[in-house]
Amino acid sequence: MSVERIYTRKRSGGPQTSHERVQIVAGAGIEGDRYFDRHDEPGQNVTFVEAEAIEALLAEYDAPRDLSTTGRNIVTRGVRLNELVGREFLVGSVRFRGVELCEPCMLLGKVLASPPLPADAVVKRLVHRAGLRADALSSGELVVGAKFETAA
C-alpha cells in the first residue's frame, strides 16, 4: 500500500508535472498545485486515485497507460481508497482525512475515451472508482514510495 506517482498541475487544463517528492501544507494541500489553498469544494486539498482502477480500464481497451491523464495528484497501488471516506490515514508522515469520492466527470471521460469506449461510457465505468478527495491534516514531505497507514 503505497504512493506510486505524484502529480501537480500549475493551472487548470495545463500539463501534469510528475514529482518524486512534494510539500504538503495542512489545510492547503500540495505547494505548487492549482488547488493549493483553495476551498471551493470539500476535500479540495489533495486527490488520490488507484492505479489498478485506471490500468484495468485502459488495458481492457488497449489504450496507452498514462496515469497522469486522470488529473489526480497521488496515484496509489494496493490501497482501497473507497474505504478511506470519512477516515483519517497517514501517508508517510503526513496525515489526511478522506472527505468524499472523487467521481468522474465528462472531462475525465473525454481524456480517457478511445474509439471503442466513448467518454460517457468511461464516466459510467469509473463511478465509485475514480478516486478520493482528501484534506491535509498535517504538513510534511510526501514522497513516491510512501506507505499508507490507516487507523483500525
Image: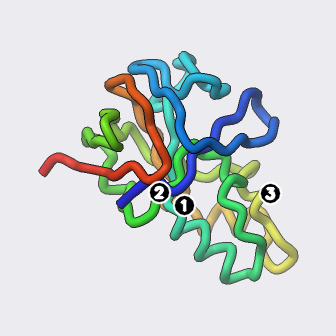
Numbered circles on residues, count: 3
Whichever of labels 3 and 1 marks the residue nearer the N terminus, that label is 3
Whether residues under marks 3 and 2 lie with C-beta atoms below 8 angstroms apart, the answer is no
Measured in 3D between alpha carbons, the distance from the residue under mark 3 to the one under mark 2, in whole angstroms, is 22 Å
Q: Residue at x 31, y 36 (%)?
A: 93
Q: Position of residue 131 (x, y in %)?
A: 50, 52
Q: Amino acid at mark 2?
A: Thr
Q: Residue furthest right?
A: 115
Could you say which is closer to the camera, residue 2 or residue 51?
Answer: 2
Q: Secondary structure at mark 2?
A: strand
Residue 31 position, x and y percent, is 57, 23
Marker disc for residue 127: 1
Q: Is residue 137 above or below residue 61?
A: above
Please name whichever residue, 121 or 66, is drawn nearer the observer in this view of the structure.
66
Q: Which residue is mark 2?
A: 76
Residue annotated with mark 3: 110
Say which label, 2 or 1, has the lower sequence index: 2
